[in-house]
Image: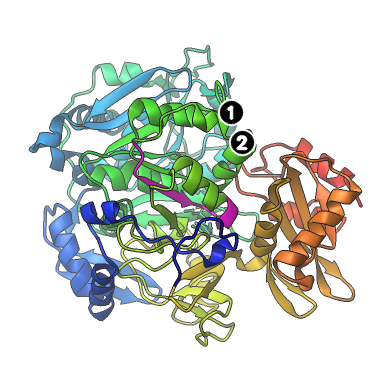
Amino acid sequence: MGTAQAGQTDTEQVVFPPPPSFSEQAGVCSMQQYQQMWDDAADDPEGFWGRLAKEELYWFHPFDKVLEWNEPYAKWFTEGKTNVSYNCLDVHLDSWRKNKAALIWEGEPGDTRTLTYAQLHREVCKFSNVLKALGVEQGDVVSIYMPMVPELAIALLACARIGAIHSVVFGGFSSEAIAERNNDASAKILLTADTGWRRGSQLPLKETVDKALEKSPTVEKCIVYRRTGSEVNMVAGRDLWWHDLMESASPDCPAEPLESETPLFILYTSGSTGKPKGIKHTTAGYNLYAKMTSRWVFDLKDTDVYWCTADIGWITGHSYIVYGPLSNGVTAVMYEGAPNWPDESRFWDIVDRHQVTIFYTAPTAIRAFIKWGDQHVEKHDLSSLRLLGTVGEPINPAAWMWYHEKIGKRRCPIVDTWWQTETGGIMMSPLPGATPTKPGSCTRPLPGIIPQIVDEKGNELGTGQQGILVITKPWPGMLRGIWGDDDRYKQQYWSTIAHNYLAGDNAMCDADGYYWIYGRLDDVLNVAGHRLSTTEVESALVSHPSVAEAAVVGRPDDVKGEAVAAFVTLSSGDANEDLRKQLKQHVRQQIGAHAQPDDVRFAALLPKTRSGKIMRRLLRDIAAGKETIGDTTTLEDYSVLASLRSDEE
Ligand code: WTA
């Protein structure tokens, strides 16, 4: 492996060793140490996880078996009794951390609140009692549709405390989507707020919930948190104000000792079909995995101010705003609003004012920052930062380099973390004090994780070959099923490649044992017999100075099987024929003739879900000249579709 050289343009070949000053202070400070941990875990997974579980979780009753594996069903730490809320809160109360900031919250209008561990504990206990008083019992499902306020975290921890199962529905979903999830999970209670702030205007959360509740027969009560003070309709007998209930609630609520496999939450995620899947996670294994991966990947220290910009409506927020950081007793920042409100420097302003040390965000956000311009970054002092992270999609090397230079000032390691809703926590990532990084690679698996790249028959592929990414051994954070649908669980994750967990991603392992994720398997194109990753083509397009963002899909082609269709948003330059030609040529230069897009369409925006994922299925329909079919309820902006269709070549 070479090392970083100034002016080197072929960024995929560049290697960035951890800065020595970072390694010196890191929990895992060398590749030897990482390798030792990984080998230990691989040689004796049950010994490895069993030891950590004993040391890192509080047990009301000890477990007697580390793993019962009845493929594809795992039970971790059987007979043990613990409680996630206890592990996140109570364990800190008899230490100096009692009065340490647990959450530093900032609202979009600029209001702030800080909750210490003791204060957070008190609020959680009170809200647990509120839930109990409404008849919520262990195993009941509580649906949560709230803005990013501390009460959202409080709600999660309160459910965990009493053994209720939370199902968070991201605050951007429609009433139809909420009702579908309520019904699938048979939710008993729904938590919401009057309205939520978004770019200075208000999201009508309660109004949306009112419509959803017309179609949610299992929901008995709706608890409404007053965030903005907007007037909302309250239905007598069904709707209750959060503050009224909290007023009389007792702050005394011991955490319930819960069996290790007690369901902790359901989180709905999209599959290849239109119907969302309720991914199920349970108590002890998930808790341990979120805790350990947070500590390893973010090198957490008591002095850190850690900020994950995700929404708690997604798995990243569950594991890396709430459960992972709080289990480690760290101070976590939580921000309510948009990154471009009141202007595009908001994130950097937050980093500066709260002296954030660890910053974890998504590549799509990074590409937005690039598009908005460096002047917004340069207004603020980012010298408090020591570590950067990304999650959610492959990061193109150009975005990685910008992040490294403009945000990290070439000082901060970047952890590109690969994982999924299903995996519960990070599966592959650099350890920042140990792993030399390569832009665009999530590097190596974490201890206890054994990935493999295989072909359709399950044969292991060699170095440098793209194939199907599977995980060969169970791990504590793994999903325990799809809510109410065992068949789909078996069929989607365990039947394509026998005895292996199918991640659904296309990946490659290079000669250094580094993994490169090329996107979902269904995004792999076969162009005239060449296997081609859409992500690879996108990365090439984005490396052109005029391109802000690109999405590439396949469309049927009589001669080549599939042709490459590219949808491009520009950061500069004019959307004209000349640029179209240039971009095709650029991709040809970057990858090869087989990758040259057949179509390049310019668009002001790409169709995205509210979580920022590009909706490729829609693009495939548009590229093929078909009417868009299937579920579009997660699309953020419908007008995007019309504008994409109109840019025909
Ligand atoms: C993709 C988000 C490349 C991948 C935590 C995965 C990534 C899907 C990365 C899961 C990464 C996530 N590099 N691809 N670092 N992280 N992905 O369930 O395709 O929202 O299968 O979980 O995102 O998305 P999910």
Residue at left 36%, top 35%? 383
Q: Secondary structure at mark 1?
A: helix
Residue 457, which numbered label?
none
The amino acid sitting under disc 2 is Ser
- Location of residue 283 by image quarter: bottom left
Helix, strand, or loop for circle 2? loop
Contact check, label 1 and label 2, Cβ < 8 Å: yes
Snapshot quadrant of residue 17: bottom left
Q: Label 2 belongs to which residue?
A: 174
Give the x, y percent position of residue 480.
Answer: 39, 63
The residues colored magenta run 384-398
| Amino acid found under the numbered disc labelled 1 | Thr
Q: Quadrant of the N terminus?
A: bottom left
Image side of residue 280 versus residue 638, left or right: left
* Relative depth, front residue between 42 and 11: 11
| Direction from residue 567 to residue 520 in the image, left or right | left
**Residue at 73% across / 78% down in the picture?**
530
Q: Which residue is mark 1?
A: 208
| Figure label count | 2
**x 34%, y 17%: residue:** 243
Quick one: label 1, few (<14), some, or many (20+) residues within 10 Å?
Answer: many
Q: Is residue 475 magenta?
A: no
- Location of residue 161 in the rendering, given as x and y in whole percent from the top left corner: 24, 41
- Looking at marks 1 and 2 on the same chain, the residue that comes earlier in the sequence is marked by 2
Q: How is the image coloured?
A: rainbow
Question: Can residue 168 be seen in this snapshot?
Answer: no
Outermost residue toward the front in this view? 6
Which residue lies at the image location 50% right of the left edge and 64% below the top edge? Answer: 14
